[in-house]
């Protein structure tokens, strides 16, 4: 069993968007720079995030990888990337954490739901501060849509926004589009293969997984 996943490499922001429509990578190498998905919009200003991705010459052992990822760092080595998702998948497959326990723990760290009339900049700030790649939008306290980092990037490209314009955009988040908030039939499977999973009104993503890895790190 492995605790890493493929690294997507592209030459432009447009190519990155195309790749994201076919797969669900959490780290993208764009024009030689590494971007976690929740910070991929930073490529609009050619500002690779510092410290978010660590490149090593060899793949670290599981315990070290777990420690690094639980602290919020993505690890790249030999064309592969270690993410909270890949670590969680390995932990479940190896019996270090039961599927039920993993889900219960992550539900305590669901991504906060924003109002549909919250601004685009509020969505982006939540993604940046939490490391979230998906955000639920609520209407009358009910989750109705989900927007991801992919929608944010597509929105910026379609409108020709610069990074600064995106970070200051007061347009309602509902304009980002996104998908209808529907309950996952198998939340853990969705989370381990896609960008997010939904359980009732709550949404789990890679940031939810990362927040439980610190607990796991203390027991491995």
Image (tube, rainbow, N blue to C red):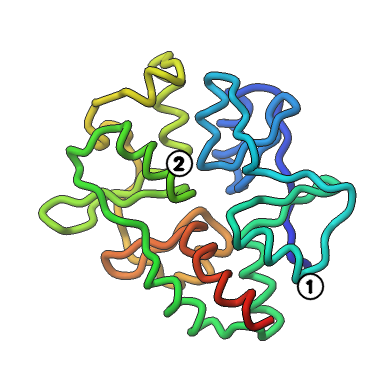
Looking at the figure, which quarter contains the C terminus?
bottom right
Mark 2 burial class by Cα count in 10 Å: few <14, some 14-19, many 20+: some
User: Of residues 160 and 45, which is closer to you in this image?
Assistant: 45
Residue 30 drawn at (x, y percent)? 68, 29
Q: Quadrant of residue 54?
A: top right
**Position of 143 compared to 108: left or right?**
left
At horizontal 38% and vertical 23% (from top left) the residue drawn is 166
Figure check: 89 above or below 111: below
Task: Identify the residue under disc 2.
Answer: 128
At horizontal 42% and vertical 36% (from top left) the residue drawn is 151
Give the number of the mark in front: 2 or 1.
Answer: 2
Spot the residue most to the left.
Answer: 140
Spot the residue most to the right.
Answer: 57
SS category of the residue bearing label 2: helix
Can you tell which mark lies on residue 126?
none
Mark 1 burial class by Cα count in 10 Å: few <14, some 14-19, many 20+: few
At horizontal 65% and vertical 56% (from top left) the residue drawn is 83
The reply to whether discs 2 and 1 touch (Cβ–Cβ < 8 Å) is: no
**Position of 165 compared to 208: left or right?**
left
At horizontal 50% and vertical 53% (from top left) the residue drawn is 195
Can you tell which mark lies on residue 1?
1
Residue 61 drawn at (x, y percent)? 82, 67
Q: Quadrant of residue 156?
A: top left
**C-alpha span from label 2 to label 1:** 31 Å
Q: Quadrant of residue 160?
A: top left
SS category of the residue bearing label 1: loop
**Position of 79 compared to 114: left or right?**
right
| Mark with earlier residue (2, 1) | 1
Residue 12 drawn at (x, y percent)? 65, 22
């Amino acid at each position: 069993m492995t605790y890493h996943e493929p690294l997507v490499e592209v030459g432009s922001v447009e190519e990155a968007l195309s790749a994201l429509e076919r797969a669900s990578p959490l780290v993208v190498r764009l024009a030689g720079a590494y971007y976690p998905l929740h910070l991929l919009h930073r490529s609009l200003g050619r500002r690779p995030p510092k410290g978010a991705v660590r490149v090593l010459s060899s793949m670290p052992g599981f315990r070290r990888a777990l420690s690094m990822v639980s602290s919020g760092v993505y690890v790249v080595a030999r064309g592969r990337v270690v993410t909270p998702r890949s670590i969680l998948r390995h932990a479940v497959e190896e019996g270090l954490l039961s599927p039920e326990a993993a889900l219960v723990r992550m539900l305590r760290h669901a991504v906060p739901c924003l109002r549909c009339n919250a601004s685009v900049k509020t969505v982006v700030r939540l993604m940046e501060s939490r490391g979230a790649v998906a955000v639920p939008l609520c209407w009358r306290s009910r989750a109705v849509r989900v927007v991801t980092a992919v929608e944010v990037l597509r929105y910026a490209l379609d409108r020709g926004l610069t990074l600064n314009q995106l970070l200051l955009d007061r347009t309602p988040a509902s304009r980002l589009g996104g998908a209808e908030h529907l309950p996952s039939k198998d939340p853990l499977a969705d989370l381990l293969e896609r960008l997010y999973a939904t359980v009732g009104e709550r949404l789990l993503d890679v940031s939810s997984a990362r927040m439980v890895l610190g607990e796991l790190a203390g027991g491995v």
